[in-house]
Amino acid sequence: MNKIYITEDIKNYKKGIEILEKIKKYEFIEDKKTFVKMIRDMKLTNEEEKQYMLFTTKKGNFLKNYYLDDNLSKIKEEFYLSYENNCPFNCLYCYLRDYFNHSAFIFYVNLEDMFTELDKFNKAGSMVSAGIVNDTLVHDNLTNVTFDLIEYFKNRPELILELRTKSNNIKNLLKIDPPKNILISFTFSPQEVIDRYELGASSLRERIAAAKKLQERGYSIGLRLDPMIDIEGSDVAYRGMVEEIFSVLDLAKIRDIGIGTIRYKKGLRQKVLAERNTDLFFNEFVVGIDGKERYFKKIRIDMYKNIVNSINKYGNFDIYLGMEPQYIWDEVFKKEAR
């Protein structure tokens, strides 16, 4: 059962009023800072913190630059929206455990301010991602934010809106006639990885079925095979996952495919192991140029080549690597890997 808090000022915004009509049991709190302090003072586990929700307003910018070390090759996720933070899924590798100092869900209702800010964003051709610091669909039945986002971006055809998710909560999306510049990206993992490390998230079959329904509704789909995890028999597991995905989806409506391997800051490992016994960090890792721990180069390259070769059996797709230096790209995509 979620414990819901609100700040008084959400009553001044359309989205705040809309949400208050749905949530009947809540408590008032002074501001976000007070809410976060309350969460931290209770010394809750990560899972317990996820049971808390706050609806409030945002004072800073909604549109963010995705930080990428200068030594890493450019990725598509250059800009992202921060209108909500965290999600109820308990993915053990999730960098948000370390990025924020809590795991409670926060939603900012002053979307008018976000769209005013976006009005000034004029980098045509850019992809603006939602789902980098949240999951865009898991709470959509409560927030209905996909309606607001798509309604805005349908009038900004020079931009691409990416909605990223591990959820199969697509009810609202199926009610919308999708503009061509809307991309729904699903993070896919083998079911064994989901069972072990993506606790509470939708199953592989559920995600594939949801993606298929959205394609049939007219949406373009992105595949995010990231983070790949080097479990025992990972080559077979990831090849099987690719086969399962590509045997169901409409290949012509796959816009792009992002792949990456697990990477994290040292603090994340300490937080996870303090609460849960997991083999996620048993492999040997090396600290990269951006300060994040990764598998050794050979492991990453072998994993990438395996999955790229599996994908290429189904055709030519726009594939990119997440947070890797150019020499890794060159090795993975050289001719013999295609």
Image (tube, rainbow, N blue to C red):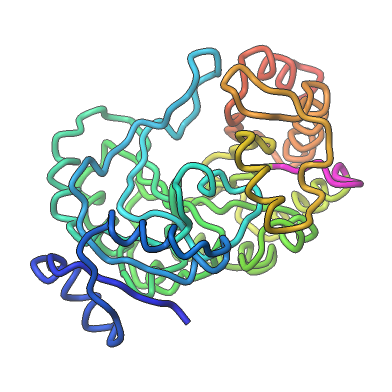
| Residue 307 sits in quarter | top right
Q: Residue 216 versus residue 127: which sits nearer the camera?
A: 127
Residue 122 in view (yes/no): yes
Asked if residue 149 lies left or right of residue 311, the reply is left
Residue farthest toward the bottom in the current orientation of the protein: 24
Q: Where residue 326 sits: x, y (%)?
A: 61, 14
Q: Residue 257 versus residue 42: which sits nearer the camera?
A: 42
Query: Which quadrant is the C terminus positioned in?
Result: top right
Asked if residue 167 lies left or right of residue 23, the reply is right
Residue that appears at 59% across and 51% down: 187
Residue that appears at 78% across and 25% down: 301
Residue farthest toward the left in the current orientation of the protein: 12
Q: Is residue 73 magenta?
A: no
Q: Residue 225 versus residue 70: which sits nearer the camera?
A: 70
Q: Which residues are magenta?
A: 228-235
Residue that appears at 20% across and 30% down: 122
Q: Where residue 218 sits: x, y (%)?
A: 44, 59
Q: Measured along the vertical axis of the image, is residue 8 above or below residue 235?
A: below
Q: Measured along the vertical axis of the image, is residue 222 above or below residue 67?
A: below
Q: Where residue 310 sits: x, y (%)?
A: 79, 39
Residue 211 in view (yes/no): no
Residue farthest toward the right in the current orientation of the protein: 233
